[in-house]
Amino acid sequence: KYADALSIIKNLWALSQENNLHFAIKLTNTLEVKNNKKILAEEMNYMSGRALHVLSVSLAAQLQEDFHGELPISFSGGAHAFNLVDLLKGGLSPVTVSSDLLKPGAYGRLQQYYLNLWRSKEEEADYWKNTDQEDQLDYLKNYAQQLLQMEDYKYQIFESKDIKSQKPLNSFDCIEAPCMQACPTEQDIPDYLHFAAQGNFNKALDVIYQNNPFPYTLGLVCEHSCQTKCTRINYDKPLRIRDLKEFIALNGEASEAQALPLNGFSVAVIGAGPSGLSAAWFMALQGWKVTIYEKDGEAGGLPQQIIPDFRLQKEKLRLDIKRILDIGVQIHYNSPIDTLKLEKLSKENDYVYFASGAPKSKSLNIKGSDVAGVRDSLKFLRDYNLGIEVNLGEKIIIIGGGNTAMDVARTANKIKNKKAQVYVVYRRSIAQMPAEAQEIKDALEEGVIFSELLTPVEIIPEQGVYRLKVQKMHLLTQFGDDGRQKVAPIDGEFDFLEADTIIPALGQQAFMPTLPFNNMKNLYVGGDAGRGGSSIVQAVADGRLFAEHIFDLEPFGASLRKKQSKEKTSERKHLKDRNTVVNSSYPKNASVATFLEAQQEAARCLQCNEYCNICVSVCPNRANESYTIPAQHYRVQDIDINDLEFTIRPSHEVKINQEYQVYNIGDYCNQCGNCSTFCPTIGAPYLDKPQIHLSRISFEESSRGYFMQKDVLLKKEKNNLLKLRIETGKLIYEDENVEVVLTYDDLRILDVYVKKEGEYKIELDKIVEMKIMLVYVFLEKQKLFG
Ligand code: SF4
Ligand code: SF4
C-alpha cells in the first residue's frame, strides 16, 4: 500500500503548504504484525527494536527518495546510542528514544548518545558543516543498504534466553557478579579482568589458577556460560571473557606453583581427564600424595581424544597438564582399573576419586540403526584426531544439536570430498540447540546445512544408500522446565532423507564398572563419570569440589590446609582504581589480539561484584535509591515469653558486608516491575528491598514499609506496627507485646518489659534492618534535609 501512503502524504503536505503550516511525518514507534509464533495470546503483535529499525530506515530512505530528500521525518524505530549518529547524518530528525532509556544505565545512557554524536562531529566535521539534503539522502540510502548486512541487525541465535541468575534477592548484600555465578568453577572473573585491564597479566593468571588449573584449554573451548550472563549484554556486548582468559594464559607468567610438603595423606585418582587432573592439582597443592591411574597412554581424557584440533590445539592442553603434573603428581599410564584394583587402591589410600569420564556415545535407538553406514560419533572424532582416514560418501547426516554434534559436523565437513554435503538433523529448532551459539554459527558459515524440527524414526537401506525416515515436528506455545519451547510431532507428516553415512551425536554416557561403594566408603565419583557427559569446565569444577569437600572432612580439617587468601567483596576497591585503567568505552570491532586490545576489553568489565545499582538506574520514577553503610555484624538474640516472665537466648548471626545497599520509596513506586525485569537476580527489588515512605499518606496506604514520625521509626509488618527509637544512647524497640532496650552498637538486650501475657516468642533479627533504616537512611536524610 506504499503508493496509497505516498499519495496521502503528498496531499497532506500540499495542504499544509497552502495553509502555511509545518508538516512532518514520524517513523515509527511500533509496527503491528501478525502473531505467527503464537507466543503471546493476541492475534497481532507489535514489532519494535532491531527488526523495526531495518524496516523503518528502508522506508525512510524510500520516502526521502520520492520527496528528493525534502520530507521532514522524525524517527524512533529501534533508535539507540549506537545508531543515533547514522540517523542524524541521514537527515532524520528529531530522533526520539524511549525503551532504550528504560534499560540499565537509563538516563545515564544519554551521555553515551552525546559522546557518540560529539565524536562524530569532531571526526567528521566536514560532513556536518557542508552537507545538504542530497548528501543526506545518499547517506540514508547507503545506511539502509548497510543495515541489511550488519550482524547486529540479523536474526541471532542468542547465547542465553535471559541473563538473570537463580540467586534470590534479600534486603541487603545483593551484589554478586552474574558471570561468577554462572561459572561452575566460580572463577573470580572481575578480579582477573581488573588486573588484565591494568596490564598486570601475571597477577591475572594467578587469580585464574586459584580456581582453575586449565586456563589454556578453557580459554579455547569453555562453553563460557559466564558470557551469557554478563551485565554488559544490557549495554552493548558481553565481555569476551573466554578470549581474555586465553590471552592471559598465553601472555601472563604465573607465580611458581608450589605444593606444600607431604602431609601424610594420599588420594588415588582414576582417570587423567579434566576432572581427575583438577582434583589432583588442588590436592597436591595442599600436600596430599596424589597418584593418577590412566587407562590410555596419554593424559587429557576426552578433550585430548575427541575435540578436533581446529578447536583445541593439543599443545595448549599439554601446557595445562604439564603444570599440574609438575607439582609432584604421580601418574601411571596404560593402567586400566577393575573392581579388584579399585578395592586395593581404596585400602591403600585415604580417598579414591573415580573420574574416568563418559567415553561411550549414546546410541540411536531406532529401527535400522545397526546398519554399517551408522558410525559412532566419538570413534569418528578419535579416528580424525589420530589421522585415520574415513570415507563418508557424499551425503552425510549428523543427528543431534550439542557441541559434539557440531564437532562431528564441522570435522566431517573438513574431510569430505568436494561434492559431498553435510547435514545436521535436529528434533527442535536451531535456536533451541544446546551447542554453543558460536559453534552453530561456524558450522553454518562453513556450509553445513541444518534441518530442524525433524525426529529420526527409521533407517531404511535402499540400493546402496540409506533413507532416513524423519517425523516432522512443530513448536508448541508451552515451554518446558528447561525454559525451551516444547515441540510435538505433526500427525502423519514424515520426510525421507538420503544418506551414505549417518552419525548420531546424541551425547555421551559413562562406562561404569559396578562400584562396590559399600566396601569403599572413601570412594567418590565425579566429572562425566558421575554426570554422564557434561562440559569440560563442569568436570574441572567437580575435581575442585571433591578436593574442597575432602579438605573440610574430619579428621583432615582446616589445619591441613593452607587457605587461599581471597579478598572479600566488601574489601575490594577495584572500581576506585578505575581511573588508572585504559579507556573502557565499547570498541566497535572488539578483538583481543594485542596487549592494548586485551587491556581495553578487560577494562569494559563493570566489576559487578562491587557495584550494581541496576534497579536504581532503570526506575523511571526514581523510586529505588542507593545508600552506603559500613560492614556490620550482629549476634541477635530472641526472647521467649511465658506469662509475664521472659528468657533471652542467643539466636543467630547477621552479617552485612557490602557497602552499597538499596531501598525502595513507596511514594514514587507505581509497581511497574521494570526493576524486576533488569535485576540480575530472580528477585523483585521493589518488593524485596526495604521500603520507606516519605509521606504519612503513602505509609498509611501501603501494607508494608517504614515511616519516620518525629524521632520514632515506624515499621508496618503483617498489619503490626513496630517502633524503634534512640534514647540516651540506647535503642528502644517496641511492638504490641514487648518493649526492649538494646545496646546501640551490638544490639545486645539490656532489658525487656512484657506488655502482653501469654506464651510466645519474639524474634529480634528484624531489629537489624530497622536500625539500618533508622540510622543510615532516615537520620541521614534528616541531616541532609532537616
Ligand atoms: S561486566 Fe565484568 S563482572 Fe559484570 S558480568 Fe560482565 S565480566 Fe562479570
Ligand atoms: S517497580 Fe517501582 S521501583 Fe521498580 S522500576 Fe517500577 S516504579 Fe521503579
Image: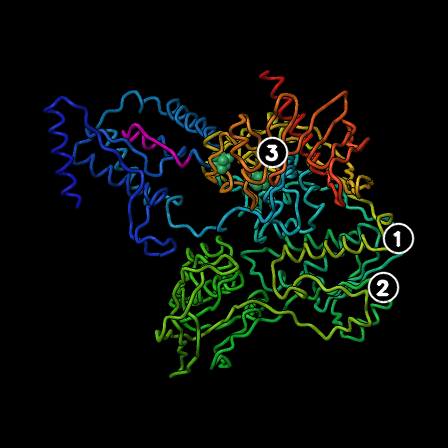
Q: Residue at x 59, y 53 (%)?
A: 222
Judge whether residue 734 is colored magenta. no
Answer with mark 3 or mark 1, whichever residue precedes in sequence.
1
Q: Residue at x 37, y 42 (%)?
A: 49
The amino acid type of the residue labelled 1 equals Asn
User: Along the line of sight, which residue is nearer the eye, 577 or 384?
Assistant: 577
| Spatial separation of the CA atoms under disc 2 and disc 3 | 46 Å
Up the image or down, 541 lies above or below 400; here it is above
Numbered-mark total: 3
In the rendered image, residue 416, in percent from the top left (x then y), is placed at 45, 67
**Outermost left residue:** 18
Q: Main secondary structure of the magenta part?
A: loop
**Outermost right residue:** 264
Dividing the picture into quarters, in which one does residue 705 lie?
top right
Answer with mark 2 or mark 1, whichever residue precedes in sequence.
1
Q: Is mark 3 within 8 Å of ligand 1?
A: no
6 sits left or right of 578 in the view: left
Up the image or down, 731 lies above or below 324; here it is above
Q: Which residues are magenta?
A: 86-100
- Which disc is residue 443 wearing? none
Q: Which residue carries the number 3 mark?
A: 611
Up the image or down, 351 lies above or below 511; here it is above
Q: Is mark 2 within 8 Å of ligand 1?
A: no
In the rendered image, residue 17, in percent from the top left (x then y), is placed at 12, 25
The amino acid type of the residue labelled 2 equals Asn
| Spatial separation of the CA atoms under disc 3 and disc 1 | 41 Å
Which secondary structure lies at badge 2?
A: loop
- Which disc is residue 349 wearing? 2
